[in-house]
Image (spheres, rainbow, N blue to C red):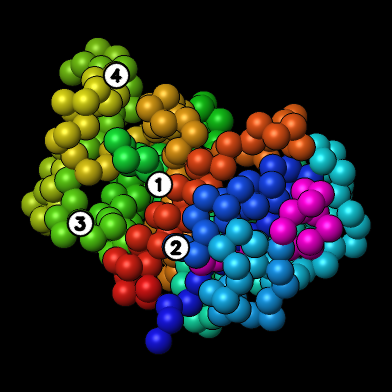
Amino acid sequence: MTAAPLVLTCGDPAGIGPEIAVSARRALGADLPFVWIGDPRHLPLGSRWQAVSAPAGAVSVAPDVLPVLRHDFPHPATPGQPDLRNAQGVIDVIARAVALVQDGQAAALCTAPIAKKVLKDGAGFAFPGHTEYLAHLGGDVPVVMMLACPELRVVPATIHIALAQVPTALTSGSLRETIRITRDGLIRDCGIAAPRIAVAGLNPHAGEGGAMGTEELDWIAPLLEEMRAEGFDLRGPLPADTMFHPAARARYDVAVCMYHDQALIPIKTLDFAGGVNVTLGLPFIRTSPDHGTAFDIVGKGIADAGSLVAALKMAHQMGRARGVI
């Protein structure tokens, strides 16, 4: 029996999503079949595509032709100019893709970049981003965002909030859950039997014994000690400024960081074009390229499909680890 293909959402049709989908198909060919959900009118002029009635049809499409599961939008797309009238269509494509994965017609989900403000202004989108919406579609399950490349995996314990809100948003309960979901996700989706987890401190130098902040002494270190006693392989709390050089990275499988930039700066420095966004904790597999819609370069022939190719490959690898491929 042939494994179900992956499903790729269109993202914002005015962004680079459609053009990098075409590029990814050319790069991957028949080796990794996926179907793109979107409006063919939004693909770059001259793109080779073929409509399919279901994801399974992707496996019989020529390797240099993009398999398309049509989802017609109200309006055409102007490259680089997001249209609020197409916002609901973007949301509907995500929901449709999730349904296809949930009922087994697709093995895993890969999502192209969206413009969150466009969705909010155009369709009243009530979620901070993809991750939160997918958690809702997955049954309101707790999830974490992991960014991954060959050299590093990172998980921010807080995501899209102001830096000033981080110390109060972080709690013993929330950090425990982030670490648990991360460990379970690496076992289930990455095939790592006993994940080694490094945990960053919140403050510079991990507080330096209380001289630069006391959160590490007050509750972070006690929590990690408690979880070690439960069988978690944890290192930390560690100074974030010494966690990401090669020798340090060799000592762990994933780094749990306290806030968005603490996690994303090192991975984007190491592999800006090839990083992958993974949502751990969902009942289905979801990956995404680690970049935005790039409205400023749409149609100029310079959009790099490397991160999308990496995201599709990672989704396929995770599908093998879960046993759905």
Q: Quadrant of residue 262?
A: top left
Is residue 50 visible in the rendered image? The answer is yes
Q: Is residue 37 magenta?
A: yes
Residue drawn at point x = 33 percent, y = 28 percent: 202
Residue drawn at point x = 70 percent, y = 34 percent: 301
* Residue range corresponding to the magenta coloring: 33-48
Q: What's the mark number on residue 146?
A: 1
Which residue type does callout 1 highlight?
Met
In contact (CB < 8 Å): disc 3 and disc 2: no
- Please tell me whether mark 2 sits on a helix, a strand or a loop: helix
Residue 236 percent coordinates (x, y): 18, 33
Q: Nearer the viewer, mark 2 or mark 4?
A: 2
Which residue, given by chain and number where applicable, does mark 2 sit on?
Answer: 31
Which residue type does callout 2 highlight?
Asp
Q: CA distance from mark 4 to mark 1?
A: 19 Å
Q: Earlier in the sequence, mark 2 or mark 4?
A: 2
Which residue, given by chain and number where applicable, does mark 4 sit on?
Answer: 241
Front-most of residues 234 and 207: 234
The quarter in which the N terminus is drawn is bottom left
Which residue type does callout 3 highlight?
Ile
Disc 4 packing (10 Å; few <14; some 14–19; many ≥20): some
- Please tell me whether mark 4 sits on a helix, a strand or a loop: helix
